[in-house]
Image (cartoon, grey):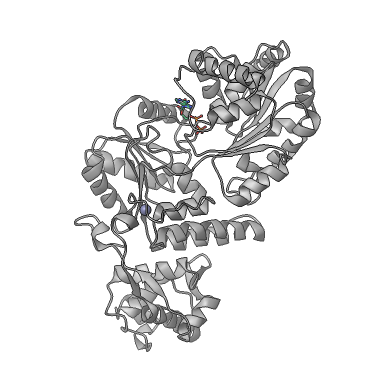
Amino acid sequence: AGAGGQAAVSAALRTLHSVFGYEAFRGEQEAIIEHVIAGGDAVVLMPTGGGKSLCYQIPARVRRGTGVVISPLIALMQDQVDALRALGVRAGFVNSTQDFEERRVVEAQFLAGELDLLYLAPERLRLEATLGLLGRGEISVFAIDEAHCVAQWGHDFRPDYLSLSLLGERWPEVPRIALTATATRATHEEITQRLGLAGARHFVASFDRPNIQYRIVPKADPKRQLLAFLREEHQGDAGIVYCLSRRAVEATAEFLTRNGIEAVAYHAGLDPATRAAHQSRFLREDGLVVVATIAFGMGIDKPDVRFVAHLDLPKSVEGYYQETGRAGRDGLPSTAWMAYGLQDVVQQRKLIQSGEGDEAFRRRAAGHLDAMLALCETARCRRAQLLAYFGQEQGAETCGNCDTCLSPPETWDGTVAAQKVLSAVVRLKRERGQKFGAGQVIDILLGRKTAKVIQFDHDQLSVFGVGQELAEAEWRGVVRQLLAQGLLAVEGEYGTLVLTEGSAEVLRGRRQVPLRKEARQAAAPGAQGRA
Ligand code: ADP
Ligand code: ZN
């Protein structure tokens, strides 16, 4: 660094010490901050908890003028601004939650040069009034937080972000820094291109979180499996349990509490006061478990979250990584644990098909789900697979700290089993024109004369009872893996199983089907049976 660079570094360090109270920069923070203070544009890819905020907060303090932060997280702005003010940083925000008077005060402060940081929701930049306001003040830096929102192929696309490219055109002399925790190559490229950041320097931090142990177990009786996991490994620890539905959240929180583990619920259906109370208890107390829908955790900064558990399958690897990334920010050993089963796959595929959105949206969602399933079904190191997904291939193929490394899954030749499942699906379709889900197929293979089997004469099928060599849970595993491998698909609101192009190859014996053996020991003691 030249003389200017030296001055920038020492000003940045002074701010780090005196304002934020930290000893030293972490990772690439120093290089990023120096670059932005010197007026350079930057694209920053850093995992959640990596310390992105300081990368624009410090330049905003050191450079003349106000740092303008574009963030979609309106609900967090008040907290962020409060936290900054407590440190003596002059911060304000403008968003739709404010009344006219509150907004006027913040705008006046900005124009008077009395703000270090001004937080804005992206939709405000579509208003000429906002652009006019920014034009009349002095801006030190534009920070575009959650920059993956600009990417059509991201999991969180927001059209408002597309208008952000005009910042560079209107304020060519103001440095821009785009930040995200999503680092797939496609997203990275879209951020660079759509925000007009071709000339920016790129800072890509490692996405590895070596202290987090990744584990994915077959779902049998998820609440009991969770309870066993907590009792054995995380008694008295703080953690987050994610469920998809509010009902599951309530039921799980209650179940844990009844079984001696203190847990509270958190979802969008609770009134704001209860939600705030539960969140602040989680932050304050030791060892509280929050059972939540994905609404919980964004921007929450609790370093000693010892585990994150998923009772339902996340919709994307990005989501999974972000949620599990809330564990172990203090660097101490933590666990990312998930129970995953056939029903998850069927349900999510159904949701995608029956959900809103155009064909392109559906294809995108299906792609995200496929990547998530591949992570669940892999026999490879989970961490290697995760990092590869984020475009960060590592030298080592085994991390020694995930379930597949700790107890490598056995694989078996599932070709014959797959053919049995697929044949049953063919017969059901051919003979009846009726629609049946995985449950009926498995009952037929096992030779079970259930009411529904009798009703449709399925005990007369040639495949009836041909699958006695495997147990029900194992058949569910076969079906699940076939779905994950694209050798079987689901259709319609009842989750009807249907064949794919790949199925034909398997049925004709042209394609082998290696399957992962179900880890029987992973089921909680006394929890076998219900799948
Ligand atoms: P991100 O936005 O990347 O998820 P944050 O900016 O919220 O991460 O930072 C995560 C946590 O790390 C915060 O508690 C923050 O105060 C802390 N932190 C960031 N930089 C440093 C540093 N240089 N030294 C110590 N703590 C830091
Ligand atoms: Zn591993």
Q: Residue at x 26, y 47 (%)?
A: 229
Between 26 and 166, the one nearer to me in the picture? 26
Determine if residue 100 is in view: no
Q: Residue at x 44, y 20 (%)?
A: 23
Name the spot of residue 237 as percent of width and height, x first.
28, 35
Q: Is residue 413 above or below residue 267?
A: below
Name the spot of residue 12 as percent of width and height, x first.
57, 19
Name the spot of residue 76 as percent of width and height, x first.
54, 28
Between 30 and 411, the one nearer to me in the picture? 30
Between 238 and 375, the one nearer to me in the picture? 375
Q: Give left or right: position of 297 versus 368.
A: left
Q: Residue at x 53, y 14 (%)?
A: 14
Q: For residue 442, which quarter of the picture?
A: bottom left
Q: Give left or right: position of 102 versus 133.
A: left
User: Where the C terminus falls, by quadrant?
Assistant: bottom left
Q: Give left or right: position of 255 versus 513.
A: left
Q: Residue furthest left?
A: 526
Name the spot of residue 109 as percent of width and height, x first.
68, 12
Q: Is residue 379 above or below residue 412?
A: above
Q: For residue 115, which quarter of the picture?
A: top right
Determine if residue 491 is in view: yes
Q: Is residue 359 above or below residue 307?
A: below
Q: Give left or right: position of 14 versus 189.
A: left
